[in-house]
Amino acid sequence: DVKVTQSSRYLVKRTGEKVFLECVQDMDHENMFWYRQDPGLGLRLIYFSYDVKMKEKGDIPEGYSVSREKKERFSLILESASTNQTSMYLCATRQGAFEQYFGPGTRLTVT
Amino acid sequence: SQQGEEDPQALSIQEGENATMNCSYKTSINNLQWYRQNSGRGLVHLILIRSNEREKHSGRLRVTLDTSKKSSSLLITASRAADTASYFCATGSQGGSEKLVFGKGTKLTVNP
């Protein structure tokens, strides 16, 4: 079974803090994704990566950056957290053009 | 940009009944996938149907795809309380894009 883990289930940060969300997968998948999920808006793609050190912007990259130094790990960085970044963050992986495997999510609250 | 749009937004049924959810999309697709999300958790892949397929089954799930109408439906037969969850469709576009685009989901409640 594919396992996708996220560093925290719940996280509370203050406005202006730098926040790191980490995602680790154990299946050697090429593609990794970061989404945020908000009520009424569904899942929106922030960034994705199709290889080590490669990244592409999704639909809402503003205020975020990513890092993929190793194939199994994809980090989402909030450079200066703001209250409008309070959300559920979901990491996913995929091999080829098939189904995505999601982590359990991190519910981030920025106060 | 949102591609898939699920309908209805919410559905409440009794255990044993069938549940049907619909998804419409706008552009040409390579495949369409359905995912399930239990409250506060990650999404779990249910089924994938390719653009050249019209119907697919997996256990109590039946998915249809009508590319001429740009729509898909997910049927869950003999529903159980444990099927209570949100269901999302996601489309993979033609042209080699690596992105899936998710709809906003249908929240299904199955009452015991």
Image (cartoon, coloured by chain):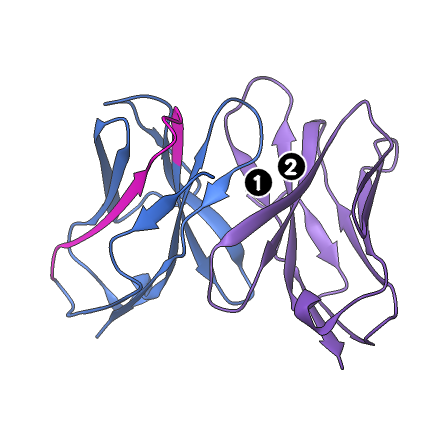
Chain colours: A blue, B purple
Name the residue tied to disc 2: B91
Check the picture and name the quadrant holding the C terminus of chain B. bottom right
Contact flag, marks 1 and 2 (Cβ < 8 Å): yes
Q: Label 2 neighbourhood size at 10 Å, few (<14), some (14-19), many (20+)?
A: many
Residue A21 falls inside the magenta stretch = yes
Residue A94: horizontal and vertical position, in percent? 47, 31
User: Disc 1 to disc 2, how far (Cα)?
Assistant: 5 Å
Q: What residue is rendered at 47% in x and 67% in y?
A: B40
| Relative to A86, B52 lies left or right | right
**Element on which disc 2 rests:** strand
| Relative to B65, A30 lies left or right | left
Q: What residue is rendered at 60% in x and 17% in y?
A: B95
Check residue B101 in the rendering and tell me which mark sits there, or answer none.
1
Farthest top residue in view: B95
Q: Quadrant of residue A105?
A: bottom left
Check residue A14 in the rendering and tell me which mark sits there, or answer none.
none
Relative to the observer, which residue lies in front, B10 or A73? A73
Q: Chain of mark 2?
A: B
Instruction: Name the amino acid type tagged 2.
Output: Thr
Q: What residue is rendered at 41% in x and 37% in y?
A: A58
Residue A78 falls inside the magenta stretch = no
Q: Chain of mark 1?
A: B
Check the picture and name the quadrant holding the N terminus of chain B. top right
| Relative to A13, A103 lies left or right | right
Q: Quadrant of residue B10?
A: bottom right
Q: What residue is rendered at 26% in x and 60% in y?
A: A8
Comes first in the chain, label 1 or label 2: 2
Farthest left residue in view: A17
Which residues fall within the magenta stretch? A17-32
